Image (tube, coloured by chain):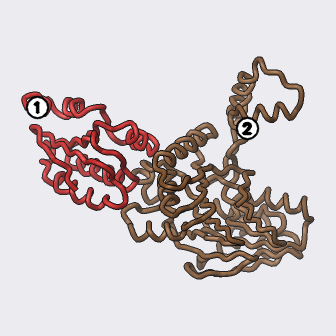
Chain colours: A brown, B red
Amino acid sequence: MRIRFWGTRGSIPVAMTSASVKQKLVTMLLKAVGQRFDTVAQVEAFVEREGPMPYTFGGNSSCVQLDTGGRDYVLCDVGSGVRPFGNDVLARRGPTGHTFHVFMSHLHWDHIMGFPFFVPVYVPGNTIRIYGCHAALEEAFRRQHCAPSFPVDYGRLGATIEYVRLEPGRTYEVAGLRVRAMRQHHGGDSYGYRFEHDGKVAVYSTDSEHKLEDQAQTDAFVEFFRDADLVIFDAMYSLADAVTVKEDWGHSSNVVGVELCQRAGARRLCMFHHEPVYDDEQLVAVLDETRRFEEITRGERRLEVSSAYDGMEIEL
Amino acid sequence: MDLSPKRFADTVVVAPAGRIDQSNVAAFGAALAPVLAACAPGKDRVILDCARLEFISSAGLRILMLAARQTKAQQGCLIVSGLSPLVQEIFQISRFTMIFDIVPTLRDALAKASPAALAELDKA
């Protein structure tokens, strides 16, 4: 199973600023003083090796693809990251004849906003099956196409769009995956998904606040993450913010992500749903600190820690 | 959990030891609660002397946050002292350095809390 991140930013899409681009170029050129490059490959290797981070975290709001090698596409959420995903599908496999299975964590705007810009939805012959646990699943998608919010009414979408209501705790078979949802603490509720395929387990758990005083909830999440090969985790805030000024805002922290994954025996933690005010430099600093936290709290097994960015891929 | 509370004039010092994690965080909270409740509103200060603290988890840090909130509501203050390098790192990574008043030693904490408390320490 290969995981592709098309949108990783929390709450609202962000663009890297001109000042950030300039800063990266200045830093890189300073590091290159005295170096000699004879080939493009040498330059690329230098950039990869020396940083500053030769990419940007971006970017788009939540959209993650689970690629099992099957013909159908499987996604979690349709934030603005689904726009480049759709364009990629069109470029690689043409405009029609596709089936997309979309698992919705919840219906807040940043998780559905990409849908009107997902080109396959306008093309007859495509099927989009949207799965979720919220009663208002269909209503949320229809409503954002209504005037005056968007010029193309939902009724004019060409694809076949179906909605499948899921029950948390029940296991379903979809596109070759076994999937189970779990209710999470977030405004209006959100749902995490545990996907299993061919002996590999990926958990998508975003927009989820963890109440540290609730032992039963903590234990339930440990079981939900149990032995996962990858946990995609809402690490939007620092722990201090999450338990003070941003308590009940519905998000979690890097520290709690490490602790839960360690208790669950997970192999990889990927921090996700980044705070929009953080720039690349701050997110790299958080990643470095989180890796250090994992190191000083490590038990018998190392937890691999990464931070999702738009375009990142993880092979399980 | 034994927090070894000691009073220096208008300042109470509690000193957790070892590890505070999921397994004993409830006991830590239960041990801290009566100490805080016994503090005189508008008068007493609290020092958390961490010199013997080896590790603290997120749930333990949350208890500290609640303690700080309670002392503030009682018009008091909570000062943290004696963090080991490792526990200092945990405070830094979790950004609890931004919400606590942290000083290097117990003596520094007493000096900051109250001259009477420091004088009592020097007398002892």
Which chain letter matches label 1? B
How far across and how far down the image is residue A87, in percent?
A: 84, 58
Q: Which residue matches tag 2?
A: A54
Q: Amino acid at mark 2?
A: Pro
How far across and how far down the image is residue A279, in percent?
A: 62, 40
Residue A273 sits in which quadrant? bottom right
Numbered badge on residue B116: 1
Image quadrant for the N terminus of chain A? bottom right
A154 vs B18: above or below: below
The foreground one among A286 and A245 is A286
How far across and how far down the image is residue A188, in percent?
A: 52, 69
Side (left or right) of A172 relative to B74: right
**Secondary structure beneath disc 1?**
helix
**Secondary structure beneath disc 2?**
loop
Q: Is residue A288 visible?
A: yes
Residue A282 sits in which quadrant? top right
Same-chain check, marks 1 and 2: no
Residue in the image at 89% along x and 26% along y: A38
Other-residue count near label 1 (Cα within 10 Å), few / some / many at <14 / 14–19 / ≥20 = some
Side (left or right) of B26 relative to B110: right
Residue in the image at 27% along x and 51% along y: B67
- Estimate the spatial distance between the alpha carbons at disc 1 and disc 2, rounded to whole Å: 57 Å
Which chain letter matches label 2? A
Q: Nearer the viewer, mark 1 or mark 2?
A: 2
A315 vs B94: above or below: below
The single residue placed furthest to the left in the displayed view is B123
The foreground one among A266 and B72 is A266
Q: Is residue B98 visible?
A: no
